[in-house]
Amino acid sequence: MKNVIEVKKLTKEYKNLKAVDDISFEVKEGEILGLLGPNGSGKSTTINCILSLLEFSDGKIKIFGEEMKPDSYSIKEKIGVIFQDVAVFEELTVYENIDYFCGLYIKDKTTREKYIEDAVKLVGLEEFLKFYPKQLSGGLLRRLNIACGIAHKPKLIFLDEPTVAVDPQSRNNILDGIKKLRDNGATIVYTTHYMEEVEILCDRVIILDKGKIIASGTNDELKELAKIKEKVSVELIDQKETLLDKVRTLKHVENVTLNNNLLVITYRKGTNNLGNLIDFLKEENVKYSKIYSERPTLNDVFLELTGKELRD
Ligand SMILES: Nc1ncnc2c1ncn2[C@@H]1O[C@H](COP(=O)(O)OP(=O)(O)O)[C@@H](O)[C@H]1O
Ligand SMILES: [Mg+2]
């Protein structure tokens, strides 16, 4: 697969703070790459450097195989950017806003009308075309912001935390829309501090902390970094004194706890644990009302790598 973006040894300093600290990565054609990290980890700074909107101390950026510079207009017209802060015109309606931004790139009126229709459909704003931004809820406003950024059908799209402070319906709409953009052939860079979004949306993830890349890979590859590969919880109906010691001797078991009637078992390896445990409980004639298994989340991985939670 071709690299759409190549970032080599990028560093951005503010006085004595390294907001981005010597990071290198590629974005491959047709993928959704997630930049995941807590607030202040350098996600927006990275994007703004890639786009040549910020000067950086050190590093090289290539987009579509060419070096990216502040005046690389032929590259820039193939890019769509949705910034963290909503930027639309208050005095224009929803339709007029999208028309304005699309019109910066698409001069032919018939083509533009078709493109605007596609953008409106993608974010589900059909009912709101005549509304002004201040009449829209936070979620709808975000959707408008996205429509403005993608209406010209850019090949490469940057979205910087587009779901912060939006309602669940808008969030789902936005995530579905981004998948459709990818399925239609766009390459996408998506920043967020919500690991759940990265898990459902991103083909590959880079985890940032304090301006550094602390891990990268697919969701599955990242979860392999977690020491605990599976957690099984059992809601016991009755308990036997000897149960805990026997469970501790089962294959792959790392730790066993019993609180009230909840037995929690963590495993070092993630294969066949649930099946083995169910067989074991049957043999031991242990009664339970519920049994369920959980895989590690990216938050568990982040916690192990940094000693802190992803969320503030
Ligand atoms: N204009 C600026 N001047 C000084 N420090 C900044 C500036 N912009 C960002 N920073 C600092 O750079 C770090 C990374 O910020 P940012 O890229 O906005 O993080 P994120 O987008 O992951 O929340 C933070 O510590 C932030 O305070
Ligand atoms: Mg940011």
Image (cartoon, grey):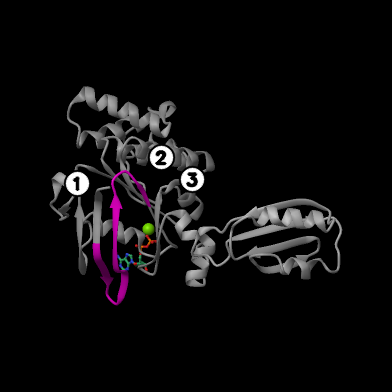
Q: Which residue is disc 2 drawn over?
A: 179
31 lies above or below 58: above
Ranked by sequence position, the earlier of labels 3 and 2 is 3
Whether tag 3 and tag 1 are in contact, CB under 8 A, the answer is no
The question of residue 16 being in magenta is answered with yes
Tag 3 residue = 166
Q: Nearer the viewer, residue 52 or 212?
A: 212
Element type at mark 1: helix
Q: Nearer the viewer, residue 2 or 87?
A: 2
What element does badge 2 sit on? Answer: helix
Of the residues under marks 3 and 1, which one precedes in the sequence?
1
Q: Is residue 253 above or below residue 288?
A: below
Q: Nearer the viewer, mark 1 or mark 2?
A: 2
Residue holding disc 1: 76
Residue 86 % position (x, y): 36, 47
Which residue type carries mark 2? Lys
Q: How many marks?
A: 3
Magenta stretch: give its range. Answer: 8-33
Q: Tell me which residue sits at (14%, 50%) in the image.
A: 72
- Residue type, mark 1 in image: Lys
Residue drawn at x 27%, y 57% is: 48
Q: Nearer the viewer, mark 3 or mark 1?
A: 1
Ligand 2 within 8 Å, label 2 CB: no
The CA span between labels 1 and 2 is: 22 Å
Asked where in the image residue 150 lies, by quadrant, the reply is: top left
